[in-house]
Amino acid sequence: MSSIPRKSLFPSAGDSWEIIAERELGGGGEEAVGQLQSWNLHVFMRPPAAPGSPHEHNPILPSDVIFLEPPQAA
C-alpha cells in the first residue's frame, strides 16, 4: 500500500465541476467533469440542497476535499 497522498484541493467559493476541471485538469468538457465526479462521489452523490439555499445549484462547498486523481491501486 502506498503512502503517497492523492492530489486534492479545497475549492474556492463558487467553484463548480467545470471550473475545477478547467483549472486543475487542463481542460473542461464532459469527460474531465465526469472523471472529477467519479473520483469525488462523496460530493457528487450528496443529497441536493434545499430550494433557496446558497448551494442549490452547486453541491461543492469550500470545506469539501476534492480529489484530482483516481484512487491508488491496492
Image: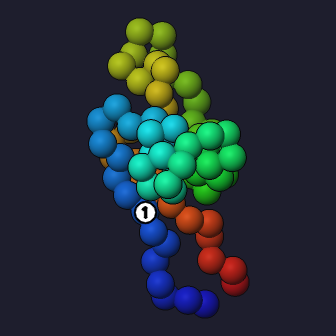
Q: Farthest residue to the front: give it.
A: 27
- Residue 8 picture location, percent across and down: 43, 62
Name the residue rendered at 69%, 46% in the picture.
31
Q: Is residue 39 left or right of residue 55?
A: right
For the C terminus, which image quadrant? Answer: bottom right
* In this picture, residue 3 sits left or right of residue 15: right
Residue identified by numbered label 1: 8
Residue nearest the observer in this picture, 6 or 28 = 28
State which quarter of the image contains the N terminus.
Answer: bottom right
Q: In the image, what residue occupies the spot 54% across and 49% down?
A: 27
Mark 1: give few (<14), some (14-19) or many (20+) Cα within 10 Å: few
Q: Is residue 46 above or below residue 63?
A: above
Pinpoint residue 47: horizontal percent, then vertical percent. Answer: 58, 30
Question: In this orientation, which residue lies closer to the viewer: 48 or 24?
Answer: 24
Which residue corresponds to the image point at 36% horizontal and 19% vertical from the top-left? Answer: 54
29 up-or-down from 71: above or below: above
The residue at the point 45 percent across, 69 percent down is 7
Point out residue 67 in the picture as x, y percentages from the top left corner.
50, 59
Residue 41 image position (x, y, % from top left):
62, 49
Q: Nearer the viewer, residue 29 or 7?
A: 29
Q: Which kind of residue does numbered mark 1 sit on? A: Ser
User: Where 59 sits versus 21, above or below?
Assistant: above
Q: Is residue 42 visible?
A: no
Q: Nearer the viewer, residue 58 or 25?
A: 25
